[in-house]
Amino acid sequence: MPSPKPSWLKRPLPRGKNFAHLTAQIRQQGLHTVCQEANCPNRWECLSQGTATFLILGPVCTRRCRFCGIIQDVPSAPNPTEPRQIAAAAKRMGLQHVVVTSTTRDDLTDGGAAYFAATVRSLAAVLPKSTVELLVPDFQGNPHALDILLDTRFHVLNHNVETVPRLYDRVRPGASFQRSLNLLRTAKDTVTGLHLKSGIMLGLGEEDREVEEVLCHLLAAGCTALTIGQYLQPTKWQLPVARYVHPEDFDWWKTHALALGFRDVSSGPLVRSSYKAGRMASLLTGLPVNGAGFETAQGR
């Protein structure tokens, strides 16, 4: 058992004007955010600063991952108006960077790829100068689903490997490390100028040499951006924390990953996939992103 939660994981919960305003808007529009559904530790900070993460295809996931706080059950049919709703919300908020994610929908033939594509097209119609980031599941390795996704124009493709290969059976049953690498590599080979991003959690029982190997595999697949965060048990039903990693160790991993060849790395105990995603997207694309308004995403 790890020691009690350390002080660096405890933080005040800011609930300013933006927090109340955005929470109300999300509820009124019938939209979902991964911030709330996955119990993200940054949700109060991000909402108070006027940013949030939208979750498409509903709040229920078909996978049985042992690290994620999203509801795992039989999901409802997708909402066909959701892509237009998200685009309308993004336009109202004047977003310069929009991140879109989903639950994993293995019940759908294409894993939801068509809904991602429809959301990208809807965003392009109303926010043609904004950058778009997609945080996607593995689509069960379906090449047709990936073709649907890559046939649309967006700027950053994010797909998290989450942990080291040895722990997949325990942490990500139903997923495959090699399948995730293949998705990233295929996307890089297919779309010129597409920026790839991935993320890994520490504190699940991994060893340093295994983390190093994962980083090298991601670089070889074409990833240039990386997030590294602390695994935190979202409910009693998920895996317990094996260890709490000190902030200085996260700093070391950032420096090391940059030295290996990543262009940008966010590494810290509370870092998640879409945390300050606009800043990273701006560095990758060279386009201005002010971070105001919503950043829509999946912090799985």
Image (spheres, rainbow, N blue to C red):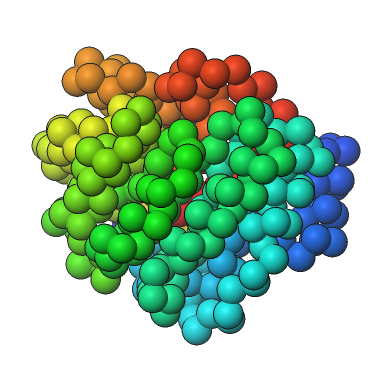
Q: Quadrant of residue 168?
A: bottom left
Quadrant in which the N terminus is drawn: bottom left
Q: Is residue 208 visible?
A: no
- Give percent across and percent down for residue 185: 21, 42
Residue at 41% x, 49% y: name it.
151
Q: Nearer the viewer, residue 279 or 254?
A: 279
Residue at 35% x, 62% y: name it.
145
Residue at 44% x, 36% y: name it.
156
Q: Is residue 300 visible?
A: yes
Q: Nearer the viewer, residue 152 or 244?
A: 152
In the displayed structure, would residue 74 be above or below residue 89?
below
- Give percent across and percent down for residue 254: 33, 23
Q: Is residue 258 left or right of residue 77?
A: left
- Give percent across and percent down for residue 11: 63, 37
Give the farthest residue toward the bottom.
74
Q: Nearer the viewer, residue 185 or 300?
A: 185
